[in-house]
Image: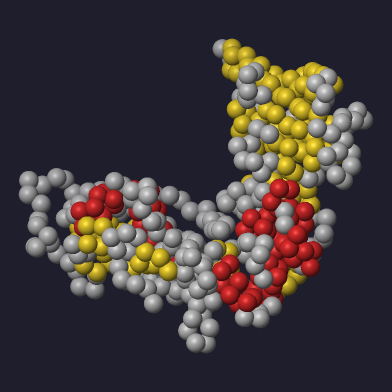
Amino acid sequence: MHVAVALFAICIIVAGTPPAPARATEPTLATASVPAGTTPVGASVTIHGRGYGHGVGMSQHGARGRALDGATSTSILAHYYQGATLGSITLDTPIRVRVLRDFKAAATRPLVLYGRRGEWRFDGSATVYPKDSRLEIRPTVTKTASGTTVAWRVKVIGPDGTILRAGATKSFRLRGVTTKTLFQVASRTSTYDQYRGTLRVGLKSTEPLASATNERSLEGYLQGVVPSEMPSSWPAEALKAQSIAARSYAARRLRPGVSYFDVDDDSTSQIYLGVLGEKATTTAAIKATAGVVLKSGSTIANTLFHSTGGGATEHNENVYVSPTGAKVAAPVSYLRGSTDRRPDGTAYDAGSPYATWKTRTYTRTQLSTVFGRDSRTNVGTITALDLRDRGVSGRLISVTLIGSLGTRKVSGSVFRSVFNANRPADDPSMRSTLFDLQPVP
């Protein structure tokens, strides 16, 4: 989440109406209609903005600024999650984190795992294997008229090259014999590939696809999450606030008995870097808040957070909208947007590199080309933008593009994503939906 991720399921639909049929002669810019109240697009355009991320819940840079000013973790959380209360969960609460998804194995490209730092065994077996043993899991694919079947074989190779086991296998779990044991998923593309706890390996019987899930306590999981979501050098009270928010966010997503995992290890859930991501300061913050969660009534709160609010946070229903900007989410009592400024007017998140930002300057033709590459925003030559539909923080709920081919209305998020996807790759991106065609105060 550095952050932040869309966390409500929203149906993706094509915005607006289809472009009008091509005309023999398009209206000139001099005669194109610019509705009253809209913002004309001049010969050159620069998009100015504030903040980074969706703007709902806790601003991480805002939390840092508040902590530097002497705020406690509980007062920080009370501001960003208004009305939520502190509660607790048991310290041994388990979580299942998917750390490898649909790895396509082959005879020449096996799934490769290691048991590191200590002895280990297969779940349900008494045989113990030495540290640094290597596992290679290979598929044999058989295709017939009735379908495809996959048989898997596992080979365990000792650190000296001795083959310790070779045979057929199905999905299995690996457990450490000592508390020092780690499991390395060497087939990951990331170098953050080592995990404490149990490793479940899932092998499909109809495709040569493998998955790996790290099963451990929620408290242990947080040790690999908090330093990836907030710099470990930040003030202790900000780290404590992040620990409670991250614990609550994960606890709300637990689904024991459903599927084979609870959360992913990337920004679709929370970034989890395993053992190699752990830091002493964040581990201390996790231990200082052990088991503490935020609740709304008897339910664990959906503690969304983001990098930088830009001086204000936003109501959830103004952010999680349809692709055309229609409100589809009910208001959540503790996800209310509010100003995030000191009494003197300075923003608590002023230390963020994206407290303010801007794109490069584009000609009208260049900007029209950027948005013309997506059917949702293609209006020909853009003449004006309607930027009046804003939430309490100033973020755009919807944007209406007005041009030589007509008008199209899209959500602020769609406008931002289309721009970011189609701008020249080395140009600055739009960091949030809090933007205008002039500097945002």
Q: From the top left corner, tell me how far across and down residue 328 is, in percent.
A: 46, 61
Q: Is residue 184 left or right of residue 413?
A: right
Q: Is residue 435 left or right of residue 259?
A: left
* Residue 92 position by quadrant: bottom right
Position of residue 236 relative to residue 120, above or below, is: below
Specify the farthest residue to the top: 144
Q: How is the image coloured?
A: secondary structure
Q: Residue at x 82, y 19 (%)?
A: 163
Q: Residue at x 62, y 40 (%)?
A: 190
Between residue 349 and residue 25, name the one nearer to us. Answer: 349
Q: Residue at x 19, y 69 (%)?
A: 35
Q: How many marks?
A: 0
Q: Residue at x 73, y 24 (%)?
A: 136
Between residue 262 and residue 195, name the one nearer to us. Answer: 195
- For residue 161, say whether it is visible: yes
Question: If the image is split into quadrants, where does the C terminus sit?
Answer: bottom left
Position of residue 229 relative to residue 36, above or below, is: above
Specify the farthest residue to the right: 126
Q: Is residue 107 left or right of residue 340?
A: right
Position of residue 255 relative to residue 282, above or below, is: above
Position of residue 164 relative to residue 85, above or below, is: above
Specify the farthest residue to the left: 25
Q: From the top left corner, tell me how far across and down residue 388 is, in percent.
A: 32, 71
Question: If the image is split into quadrants, where does the N terminus sit?
Answer: bottom right
Q: Is residue 184 left or right of residue 430?
A: right
- For residue 286, say whether it is visible: no
Q: From the top left corner, tell me how far across and down residue 122 is, in percent.
A: 84, 31
